[in-house]
């Protein structure tokens, strides 16, 4: 892939001059956040760009370790877990909101009630369905919140009672949906409470200014309990949507971090010292609609999956170091060994296709592959289309629709094949596997398997032993990717971006989360 | 004159009604809804949200509700940005789009006007052919190609200007040029044609015969007549510049209205799309009215009915 | 977007308050003996840029039509190991990121771009001519009302409606034709109406009416052919406007479906890869620009040829 030299003089000029970043102010970290945050209300937001802002503006019971993402004390100075893994008791530290009021256990109860309250229509309410009766309250089956598994024993003590033992509950408590919220600010200002001058927060940074679509600026919060650790004075979030522009802004020294690189620039970016690439907790895959012929035939599904050369796909098409995979759960989960899926095997694929009644692809009906408008999907689907043509002799048509059409066709099962991606919420195989149970909201393939459902249910609540639980999940994944194949995984996503070399204390990790209180800038 | 203006203003109302109704139902025809997302929402959560925004009501009732709100000047809450109302976002974006539009228009008039006058005066000269070829070239380059080229040269290459963003006059230059070039080319052709028509007329010959300086003849006598077609074009041009800024705003990351429209349409942020369409329509209706009045003022032959 | 581009190249014709002069209204041109069309053609032939434009267009359209025979590779044939290579003897214009031959892609892109340009223009022509001639022949209050509607529609952000249409009906190429054509007919309607109005007062029309020719037949057989000049000119100028609008939609991700490509979508993909693979923007961009230039030259030439009065005034 080397030796592809840009031709035009201006391109070379651009790269030479871009090496010298303009002198930025001291300890001002400029981040290209790629999109305007939809809100700053922790109970409302659902996205990653919002997480980059809110995780520094607020702080939950726990925070995440910048390197391995394990839970660290946050608003809770310490905690204890009951033997059966159901009751968590958090002891809060003496922390203050930006307006000087103390952070109390009641602020958490208020926030969690607000998310679960059906009237608030919070999109991420399911993050609190782990609480006892949380789901029932959200569905309106019970109206008395005192029956829900959260209680402020006193100002400093919070008790959470879970529905099932949840190994990753302490990871969830660092997530924005579970942040405390200042009741008095909301009651005083209504939905305007998130605006500069009105918002009250408890994180290491506070909101300095926010002009939609222009910039959002955080500044160090002197009230924060861990303020001594915080080195950055200011953080600027820029909502540049066009990834090509964002990349150019980085090259021109207008930003210190851009968390994406345009696919067409990967080759050029890779040769620069600022480029970074790390595995991401996400899988790129295709869904099969198992309710319609020919993909209702497991042999056809397996043949299609076996005929894709994932190595070539990641090496020549995606090019950023994506990891080819035939399994759905990304590698590297603590205690999870993983399974073997359907690798690249043209002979086996042809044999299966012939058994299904289409020798050499003869008589194979036209298939449609649905995908949404995106540079990466555009090239990946075209490359896979060609592989199927070459290896199986079948023609698959590409159907490109815009995002919302894609979503509605997928959830309405109005497709044959569709490209998809899944990013884990927490570091546990369950976040990749429980979605495939019968009738699961994110299943959307029509696939249903009794044994699979049983294994997932047992792993979720019934098995307490960690090893046994992982074994059950492994068995389930074996069914999913090797035996039944309602999906075909292609590769594990990577985080790829550009980070100024002045930035220190920033550790690459599998969720691409970088708590800014550990970050500083070298002069 | 006043009566004419009032009549025109009254005529806006049925037009706006049609626009609002058309866009309302068209938007609802589009597949997918504002709360479809990659992770499917649990059914109950979804129902809760829809109830909150009255999306669970029958369509006709939503329509009446919306009409009532718009009549009071309330464009509703944004579905995508739940903390903010459409009015608030448009209020923030409009000055930005307006600034950009005015600058682009200035670029277009200054560049295009000068080129057109020169070409018109030296008809069929090398200068004429050269300017007009450049002008035609300008019409033929899509702005999503021009923008990145300008960024590469002036921001990344020469470091004279910032790549993107908003706030200082330096941020304004590249987007204004990107947006204005297309119209500059167009203004040049119009001015040239206007010059050609005027320059041959008797009063210009008289002025020259009187021995007036050429510059005086051109600027004082020929120009006012020559720019009439340009004035006519201003109405459509301002409309085009405002809507055309969609691409430029995206490329240069400018916090204007165009981005809200495209983002709204793609995200099914119904109120946002409707709000931008209504807002733009009102704006364009006013622009055209102003242009008509201006035209009547400059050209005594036209009588305002 | 709509108005600027619709009027792009067409404004001298389109001025809100004056309808273009046409050779066919001009008694002098009739007296010269030859038919106005022969006259016009002779003038056009003397116009260098216009003939150059015509030549280029003919070559491009031929290439587009013959694409399956001249293209050196299948247009969707990927070769992953040979992705994004600069121009070479095997791939004259280089390859794209999936190793497809760019020359082939541009040839096939020409088919889509020309198809969009021509068909959308035909759609706009049909609507505009029908609307304009009805308004013109009806006259009176009906005419006034119909033209008021056009004035009002002029004031609408039409590109917005195109975007909404594409969102509703999906990225089907047929929808592209209709959506783009449907927003281009206003100027055409005005021109046709103006022509009809001026022709209505002419002797041959009056006498035809007197001997009992039905108005509809008169319109189709006599009035429209006489109004053809300005219509043709405007149509040549609508084609480039539509092609640019298609490019704009492609940039927003609402253009044609891959693996098909238009020049607009090739240019918009190429502009994303500008620094690394400049040939991907250079060649499609060049094809688009040269074509638009040629169309504009031809349109201007046609206008001059069909409108000797304006030329004389200069």
Image (spheres, rainbow, N blue to C red):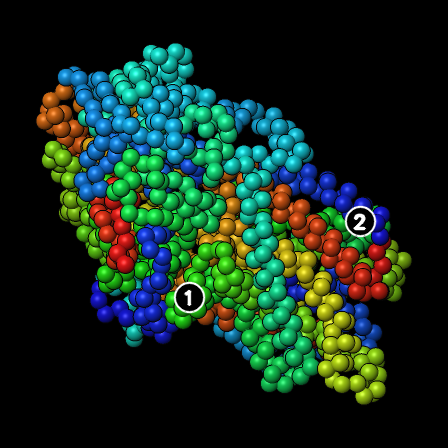
Residue ID for mark 2: B5
* Camera sees residue A259: yes
- Relative to the observer, which residue lies in front, A516 or A474? A516
User: Does the CB distance between marks 1 and 2 fall below 8 Å?
Assistant: no
Task: Identify which residue is drawn at 15% across, 40% down.
Answer: A332
* Helix, strand or loop at mark 1: helix
**Above or below, comparing residue A3 to residue B27 in the picture:** below
The image quadrant of residue B74 is top right
Percent position of residue C233, x then y: 66, 67
Q: Is residue B70 above or below residue C233?
A: above
From the image, tell me which residue sits under label 1.
B155
Quarter of image, res A267: bottom left
Residue B32, horizontal then vertical, whole percent:
46, 36
Residue furthest right in the image: C210
C251 in relation to B225, above or below: above
Q: Is residue A367 left or right of residue C308?
A: left
Q: Nearer the viewer, residue C218 or A479?
A: A479
- The residue positioned 60% from the left and 83% from the top of the image is B127
Per the rendering, the mark at residue C232 is none
Chain letter of the residue carrying label 2: B
User: Mark 2: which secondary structure?
Assistant: helix
The percent coordinates of residue C82 (x first, y second) are: 25, 64
Instruction: Report the mark closest to the observer, 1 or 2.
Output: 1
Residue C164 appears in view: no
């Amino acid at each position: 892939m080397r030796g592809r030299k840009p031709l035009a003089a201006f391109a070379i000029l651009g790269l030479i001059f871009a090496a010298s970043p303009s002198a930025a102010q001291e300890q001002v970290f400029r981040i290209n956040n790629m999109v305007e945050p939809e809100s700053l209300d922790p109970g409302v937001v659902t996205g990653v760009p919002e997480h980059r802002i809110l995780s520094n503006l607020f702080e939950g019971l726990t925070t995440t370790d910048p390197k391995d993402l394990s839970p660290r004390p946050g608003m809770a100075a310490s905690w204890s877990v009951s033997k059966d893994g159901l009751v968590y008791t958090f002891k809060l530290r003496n922390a203050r909101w930006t307006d000087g009021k103390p952070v109390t256990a009641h602020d958490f109860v208020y926030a969690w009630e607000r998310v679960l309250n059906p009237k608030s229509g919070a999109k991420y309410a399911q993050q609190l369905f782990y609480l006892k009766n949380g789901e029932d309250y959200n569905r309106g089956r019970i109206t008395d919140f005192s029956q829900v598994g959260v209680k402020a024993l006193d100002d400093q003590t919070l008790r959470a009672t879970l529905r099932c033992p949840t190994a990753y509950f302490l990871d969830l408590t660092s997530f924005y949906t579970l942040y405390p919220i200042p009741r008095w600010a909301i009651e005083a200002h209504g939905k305007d409470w998130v605006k500069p001058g009105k918002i009250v927060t408890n994180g290491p940074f506070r909101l300095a200014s926010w002009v939609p679509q222009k910039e959002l600026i955080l500044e160090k919060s002197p009230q924060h309990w861990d303020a001594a650790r915080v080195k950055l004075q200011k953080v600027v979030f820029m909502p540049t949507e066009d990834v090509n522009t964002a990349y150019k802004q980085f090259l021109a020294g207008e930003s210190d971090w851009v968390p994406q690189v345009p696919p067409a620039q990967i080759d050029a970016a890779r040769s620069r010292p600022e480029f970074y690439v790390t595995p991401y907790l996400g899988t790129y895959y295709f869904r099969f609609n198992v309710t319609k012929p020919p993909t209702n035939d497991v042999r056809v599904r397996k043949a299609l999956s076996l005929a894709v050369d994932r190595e070539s796909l990641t090496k020549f098409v995606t090019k950023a170091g994506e990891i080819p995979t035939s399994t759905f759960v990304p590698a590297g989960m603590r205690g999870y060994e993983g399974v073997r899926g359907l690798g690249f095997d043209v002979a086996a694929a042809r044999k299966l296709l012939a058994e299904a009644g289409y020798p050499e692809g003869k008589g194979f009906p036209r298939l449609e592959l649905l995908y949404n408008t995106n540079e990466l999907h555009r090239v990946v689907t075209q490359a896979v289309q060609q592989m199927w043509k070459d290896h199986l002799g079948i023609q698959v048509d590409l159907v490109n629709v815009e995002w919302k059409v894609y979503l509605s066709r997928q959830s309405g099962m109005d497709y044959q094949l569709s490209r998809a991606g899944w990013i884990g919420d927490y570091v546990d195989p369950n976040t990749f596997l429980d979605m495939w149970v019968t009738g699961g909201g994110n299943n959307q393939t029509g696939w249903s398997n009794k044994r699979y459902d049983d294994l997932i249910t047992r792993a979720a609540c019934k098995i307490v032993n960690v090893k046994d639980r992982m074994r059950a999940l492994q068995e389930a994944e074996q069914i999913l990717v090797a035996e039944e194949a309602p999906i075909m995984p292609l590769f594990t996503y990577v985080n790829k971006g550009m980070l100024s070399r002045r930035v220190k204390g920033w550790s690459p990790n599998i969720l691409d989360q970088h708590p800014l209180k550990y970050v500083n800038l070298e002069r | 004159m006043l009566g004419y203006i009032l009549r025109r203003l009254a005529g806006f109302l049925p037009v706006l009604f049609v626009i609002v109704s058309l866009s309302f139902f068209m938007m609802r025809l589009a597949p997918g809804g504002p709360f479809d997302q990659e992770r499917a929402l649990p059914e109950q959560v979804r129902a809760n949200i829809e109830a909150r925004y009255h999306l669970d009501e029958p369509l006709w009732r939503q329509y009446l509700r919306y009409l009532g709100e718009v009549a009071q000047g309330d464009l509703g809450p944004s579905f995508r940005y739940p903390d903010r109302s459409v009015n608030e976002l448009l209020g923030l974006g409009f000055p930005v789009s307006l600034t950009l539009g005015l600058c682009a228009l200035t670029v277009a008039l200054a560049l295009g006007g000068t080129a057109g006058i020169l070409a018109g005066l030296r008809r069929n000269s090398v200068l004429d052919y050269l300017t007009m070829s450049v002008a035609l070239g300008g019409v033929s380059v899509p702005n999503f190609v021009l923008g990145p080229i300008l960024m590469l040269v002036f921001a990344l290459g020469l470091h004279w200007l910032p790549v993107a963003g908003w706030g200082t006059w330096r941020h304004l230059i590249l987007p204004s040029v990107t947006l204005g070039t297309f119209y500059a080319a167009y203004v040049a052709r119009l001015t040239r044609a206007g010059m050609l028509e005027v320059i041959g007329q008797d009063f210009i010959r008289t002025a020259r015969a009187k021995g007036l300086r050429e510059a005086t003849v051109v600027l004082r006598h020929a120009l006012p007549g020559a720019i009439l077609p340009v004035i006519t074009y201003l109405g459509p041009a301002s409309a085009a510049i405002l809507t055309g800024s969609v691409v430029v705003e995206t490329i240069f990351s400018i916090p204007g209205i165009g981005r809200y429209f495209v983002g709204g349409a793609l995200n099914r942020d119904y109120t946002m799309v409707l709000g931008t369409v209504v807002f733009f329509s009102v704006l364009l209706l006013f622009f055209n009215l102003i242009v008509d009045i201006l035209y009547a003022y400059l050209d005594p032959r036209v009588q305002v009915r | 977007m709509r108005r600027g581009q619709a009027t792009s190249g067409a404004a001298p014709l389109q001025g809100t308050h004056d309808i273009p002069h046409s050779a066919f209204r001009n008694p002098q041109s009739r007296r010269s003996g030859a038919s106005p069309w022969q006259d016009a053609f002779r003038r056009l032939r003397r116009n260098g840029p216009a003939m150059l434009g015509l030549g280029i267009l003919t070559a491009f359209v031929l290439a587009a039509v013959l694409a399956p025979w001249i293209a050196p590779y299948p247009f969707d044939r990927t070769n992953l190991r040979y992705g994004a290579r600069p121009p070479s003897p095997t791939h004259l214009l280089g390859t794209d990121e999936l190793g497809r031959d760019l020359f082939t892609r541009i040839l096939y892109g020409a088919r889509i771009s020309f198809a969009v340009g021509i068909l959308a223009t035909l759609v706009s022509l049909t609507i505009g001519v029908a609307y304009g001639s009805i308004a013109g022949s009806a006259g009176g209050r009906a005419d006034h009302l119909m033209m008021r509607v056009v004035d009002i529609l002029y004031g609408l952000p039409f590109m917005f409606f195109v975007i909404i249409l594409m969102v509703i009906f999906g990225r089907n190429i047929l929808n592209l034709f209709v959506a783009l054509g449907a927003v281009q007919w206003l100027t055409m309607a005005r021109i046709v109406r103006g022509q009809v109005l001026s022709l209505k007062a002419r002797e041959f029309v009056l006498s035809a009416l007197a001997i009992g020719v039905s108005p509809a037949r008169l319109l189709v057989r006599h009035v429209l052919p006489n109004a053809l000049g300005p219509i043709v000119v405007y149509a040549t100028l609508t084609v480039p406007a539509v092609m640019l609008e298609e490019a704009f939609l492609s940039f927003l991700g609402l253009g044609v479906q891959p693996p098909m490509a238009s020049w607009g979508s090739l240019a918009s993909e190429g502009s994303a890869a500008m620094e690394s693979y400049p040939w991907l923007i250079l060649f499609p961009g060049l094809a688009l620009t040269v074509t638009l230039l040629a169309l504009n030259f031809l349109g201007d030439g046609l206008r001059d040829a069909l409108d000797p009065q304006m030329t004389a005034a200069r």
